[in-house]
Amino acid sequence: MAYNLNKAISRYKKTGKGLDLITQHINIAAYCFAEQNRYCREDDCSEFLLSFYPRIDGVIRRYRPSGLDFKTYLQSCFIWHMKSYLATRIRQKRQEEILYNENCESLMTEMDETEVWEIHEEEPEALLVPDFPEEENPDEMLKDSLHLLLLALKCANEVNDRLINLIASRIGTHSAFVFHFIEILRTTMGSRTRRIQFLVEKRRRVYFRIHYYHELLRSCRDRFHAAELERKIRKEKRRYETVNRILSNTPKSPSHSDIARILGLPKGTVDSGFFYIRRTLKRKKQAGGF
């Protein structure tokens, strides 16, 4: 399999044909690799394959046959991706345990503090159906509350306590409920936020080095030293462009998948919610509401 895969990769690099067969073999190899990991169950093998699938094109594109066969290179890619996958799975499990324990504690507290309801068999619907005002549609109220909560989670790093209280009062829930989800998102995005700060600081240092080399070049009279300074300037400019590209590709706010995972909703529900929000804002802007 390794020899055939290597031949297929070299043929694809030359002719651009056979990508589907190569992708199929890599998918099989990824699933088999996950099966051999003692921390992965059968469901985890499928999840690992789905998480690795979008990276296949980049793995093939970055491969350079310089004394290293493709199978060894692919195994190293599997190892690094498995580390990030297991770390993500552990973090999600911890967040789910924290959320479950806090919900159980709040439920027990409410059961201790509230009165015992007497249920009458003749009209159980009176206790099951919420008492909404007749002039307001309950479905529309629920949609508006969900859309407001989605906006709050999308701006989790920008909202303050005062805004959280306003959002909670508008939704009709306790502020601790909204604050809990926002804190989970902030914790989840902690590594991403620190990476963005590191990249911004790195870009600032590279910018000042470029400025410093330009100042030296302006006063330099030795042509060999000037050529060395020009080489350093080109190198720092390439580094500056790389950092800028990484920053532009790094999302500054939580993704729809992050919000859906925190709320326990399907990703399609979150996508449709944001689509409705954008459409509503566009209509109000066209009508002169803003």
Image (cartoon, helix red, strand yellow):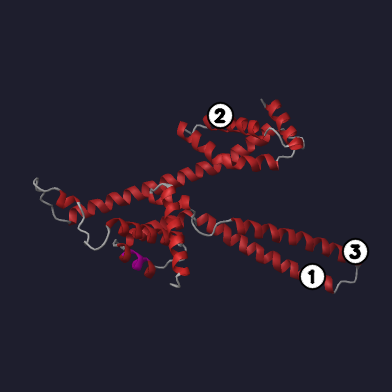
- The structure residue drawn at horizontal position 45% and vertical position 58%, both measured from the top left corner, is 186
Occupied quadrant, residue 22: top right
- N-terminal of the pair, mark 3 or mark 1, is 1
Using a 10 Å C-alpha cutoff, classify the residue at mark 1 as few (fewer than 14 neighbours), some (14 to 19) or many (20 or more).
some
Q: Is residue 163 left or right of residue 42?
A: left
Q: Which amino acid is tagged 2?
A: Cys
Whether residue 39 is visible: no
Occupied quadrant, residue 131: bottom left
Q: Is residue 30 above or below residue 183?
A: above
- The structure residue drawn at horizontal position 50% and vertical position 34%, both measured from the top left corner, is 46
- The structure residue drawn at horizontal position 24% and vertical position 63%, both measured from the top left corner, is 135
Q: Nearer the viewer, mark 3 or mark 1?
A: 1
- N-terminal of the pair, mark 2 or mark 1, is 2
**Residue 139 versus residue 227: which sits nearer the camera?**
139
Q: Which amino acid is tagged 1?
A: His
Q: Main secondary structure of the magenta part?
A: helix
Quadrant where the N terminus is found in the figure: top right
Q: Which amino acid is tagged 3?
A: Phe
Q: Which mark is residue 214?
A: 1
- Name the residue carrying label 3: 224
In the rendering, at what x and y percent does residue 290 appear? 45, 73
Q: Which mark is residue 32?
A: 2
User: For the magenta stretch, what is the residue range?
Assistant: 164-168
Per the model, the C-alpha gap separating discs 2 and 1 is 54 Å
| Secondary structure found at label 3 | helix
Q: Is residue 197 left or right of residue 226?
A: left
Disc 3 and disc 1 in contact, CB within 8 angstroms: no
In the rendering, at what x and y percent does residue 284 appear? 44, 68
Occupied quadrant, residue 235: bottom right
Disc 2 and disc 1 in contact, CB within 8 angstroms: no
